[in-house]
Image (cartoon, coloured by chain):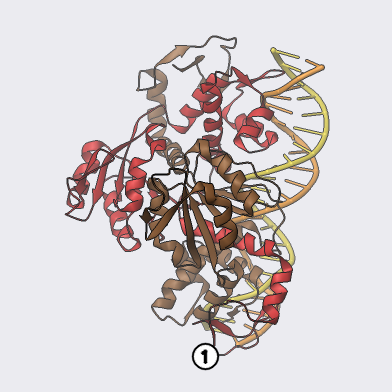
Chain colours: A brown, B red, C orange, D yellow
Amino acid sequence: MATGRTHRPATRSRGIPEATVARLPLYLRALTGLSERSVPTVSSEELAAAAGVNSAKLRKDFSYLGSYGTRGVGYDVEYLVYQISRELGLTQDWPVVIVGIGNLGAALANYGGFASRGFRVAALIDADPAMAGKPVAGIPVQHSDDLEKIISENGVSIGVIATPAGAAQPVCDRLVAAGVTSILNFAPTVLSVPEGVDVRKVDLSIELQILAFHEQRKAGEDAAAAEAGGGSEVVTPAVRGGAAVDRKGPDGDMPAVMPA
Amino acid sequence: MATGRTHRPATRSRGIPEATVARLPLYLRALTGLSERSVPTVSSEELAAAAGVNSAKLRKDFSYLGSYGTRGVGYDVEYLVYQISRELGLTQDWPVVIVGIGNLGAALANYGGFASRGFRVAALIDADPAMAGKPVAGIPVQHSDDLEKIISENGVSIGVIATPAGAAQPVCDRLVAAGVTSILNFAPTVLSVPEGVDVRKVDLSIELQILAFHEQRKAGEDAAAAEAGGGSEVVTPAVRGGAAVDRKGPDGDMPAVMPA
DNA sequence: GAATGTGAATTGTTTCACAGCA
DNA sequence: TGCTGTGAAACAATTCACATTC
């Protein structure tokens, strides 16, 4: 999961489990595809395949929303699209601000996937005065001095942070103070927010690290054995200062070393 | 979670639960911060706070790696950094290719977080001949005709897909055929891959949709009531063609309508 | 005395398997 | 007959609480 939540009770919101909520957008995407191809109905099996999950899970997920299928037939595509959209709150317009218009912020501003699903980029904000007024994705960048005003004038409740790590917490604080209650954080930092504010994070390098973990494992115990025995390109290990030479990991003893 | 996995047994890899693996990068980031500030040791309580998790979870996570702490004292920062890096496979160099050098691909190429953690952008690949040769983030873009050659010459096992949705599956197939076994997918599609290939996905609009779900809920049952009663900016509902006017959702009856 | 490491309890999620309905 | 909807079983993750060790 490229993602995690901060704060917020583990309680299911209106009975829908978090894991299910996280999959609704996936179903919606698959359904939208079918809808565009004018497919009228779809079975749990087919839809599950299109969404990349298994059908029992999908049926259980849908059962939390209500009884929207027809036994022996399947689900009406258009009807489900509407129900899921409504459940996700996509039948309304969500103005969003993006703070931090660097490479990533600009890419986000240009990203079509937002606009296509009820999200409207209401403003772009950056701390660099040189950026002010410059249009990105057709929207003029505004200076962060005006952040509070921009938020309130546009009725923004969702903010996207794409600043450098150091700026993220202060920006977050200002967004929250100005009334934002949902934040999508691309900066590699843990944000602390008051109760009632939702944070989701996307950390590109974390995803790669998780892949690397599995990749390493695939390389096999052969490689692990080789590394235990002889030299590899491990970053120059130096002898550790403190106590403990007797640490034990599950894969055998490890010399008390660490990267320089 | 901005993320999910496709394919691959639910089995713990070498006894480390997936949920734990997904948090290791977080701990590592927090530890790196402490290391830079020359903090020698840290308690589970402190580190958990810095990583944004609770301390019991952190201790349980670490217990899967081994006994790396000292009772009554805490964890040695440098030592843990090394152990986690090793566990994640970050003590080796991972050449990565990025396919699809649009706004997002370019932003990824420029993203510092990759390089800082053992990931090296070995090549940028795009299907547009006009891009070929043009440097992005100091690396010349290569044409996708040469994809297979690039993969094998650089020993790439991790690929990043940042193409439009339509191109993603063909690109994925070629990457896999050329030897890539881990894929980070930014395209909004489900990729199908053979057994043994790992896919993680990051879908920006999915994250926003999950936020919107919770945001909607925060707006309260008052808003829900208001919407049930009168007009809101629901996208022009039209009467549904098919059967069923008797569908029932958990929040009361719903007219058989859907977005236009 | 302080903080780790971990069994046991709890909570959440997935999968199974089949009753019930169109 | 075919496919949904859902209890019940299996599994996974989290949290508790405390014995253990420094």
Q: Name the residue under label 1.
A: B241
The foreground one among B189 and B16 is B189
The vertical placement of A250 against B240, above or below, is above
Measuring 63% from the left and 81% from the top, which residue is drawn there? B231
**Does residue B233 appear to the left or right of A7 in the view shown?**
left
Q: Where does the image place residue B26, in percent across and percent down from the top left?
A: 54, 36
The foreground one among B153 and B8 is B153
The number of numbered badges drawn on the structure is 1
The vertical placement of B41 against A6, above or below, is above
The foreground one among B29 and A175 is A175
Q: Where does the image place residue B40, in percent across and percent down from the top left?
A: 59, 17
Q: Is residue A26 visible?
A: yes
Q: Where does the image place residue B41, in percent across and percent down from the top left?
A: 62, 19
Q: Mark 1 lies on which chain?
A: B
The vertical placement of B80 against A35, above or below, is above
Quadrant for the C terminus of chain A, please.
top left
**Does residue A191 appear to the left or right of B226 in the view shown?**
left
Q: Can residue B251 be seen in this view?
A: no
Q: Where does the image place residue A171, in percent across and percent down from the top left?
A: 56, 44
Q: Is mark 1 on a helix, strand or loop?
A: loop
**Does residue C11 appear to the left or right of A6 in the view shown?**
right
Q: What residue type is labelled 1?
A: Gly
Q: In the figure, residue B170 lies in which quadrant?
A: bottom left
Measuring 63% from the left and 85% from the top, which residue is drawn there? B255
The foreground one among B214 and B231 is B231
**Does residue B35 appear to the left or right of A6 in the view shown?**
left
Mark 1 crowd level (few <14, some 14–19, many ≥20, 10 Å Cα): few
